[in-house]
Image (tube, grey):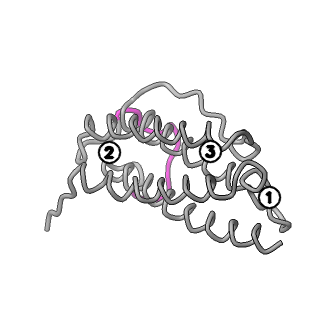
Amino acid sequence: MSTVISAEEYLFYVGTALDGMAVIVAELGDELANKRPDIPDANSPYAILTHCLGVMEWWGGHVVAGRPSGRDRDAEFTASGAVNDLVERVRRARDQLASDVAGADFGAPPRNPLAHEHDDLVTTTQGAVLLHIYEELAQHRGQMEITRDLLRSS
């Protein structure tokens, strides 16, 4: 059985996840969005969303579209700054991903395959890589919702 999701449908779900995270950081404001809950290895909402933008840039831009990447994954988790700037970065990253998706061939291998083996289907096709982006965004949106609730309760 072959089922196809359109680029428009895919971007709707990605956009919903990104919008939800952008609303959370905007509602928290600069102080709380940059704060980490008092639990081991927790990340701030700002860092979580910054990481998600890195995920989109690496997997969508580098692996699917074939662009070079200067991603610093470790720096994503220590990132902090003004919420308004981050929300603007979300808008730009969303536009870039839409362009990457428009140029993707969902059934073709990635344009820039990983140099190391991946332990699942993530890298078999451009479509699988794009689904991995959505998986990460959905997972981190839930993490950010819990993080928001913890920050508000402290």
Label 3 vs label 2, nearer the camera: 3
Which sits in the foreground, 57 or 105?
Answer: 57
The spot of residue 150 in percent (x, y) is 75, 71
Q: Are marks 1 and 3 in contact (CB under 8 Å)?
A: no
- Mark 3: amino acid: Thr
- Mark 1: amino acid: Arg
- Mark 2: amino acid: Gln
Q: Are marks 3 and 2 in contact (CB under 8 Å)?
A: no
**Residue 116 located within the stretch drawn in magenta:** yes
* Mark sitting on residue 126: 2
Q: Is residue 42 above or below residue 72?
A: below
Q: Residue at x 76, y 56 (%)?
A: 32
Q: Residues within 10 Å of mark 3 (few under 14, many from 20)?
A: many
Q: Residue at x 74, y 42 (%)?
A: 80
Picture quarter with the C terminus: bottom right
The boundaries of the magenta stretch are 111-121
The spot of residue 13 in percent (x, y) is 36, 59
Label 2 vs label 1, nearer the camera: 1
Total marks placed: 3
Horizontal side of 17 relative to 54 (left or right) equals left
Farthest-out residue, left: 1
Disc 1 element: loop
Disc 2 element: helix
Residue underneath mark 3: 50
Which sits in the foreground, 32 or 68?
Answer: 32
* Lower sequence index among marks 2 and 1: 1
Residue underneath mark 1: 36
Q: Residues within 10 Å of mark 1 (few under 14, many from 20)?
A: some
The spot of residue 145 in percent (x, y) is 61, 68
Task: Give the main secondary structure of the magenta stretch.
Answer: loop
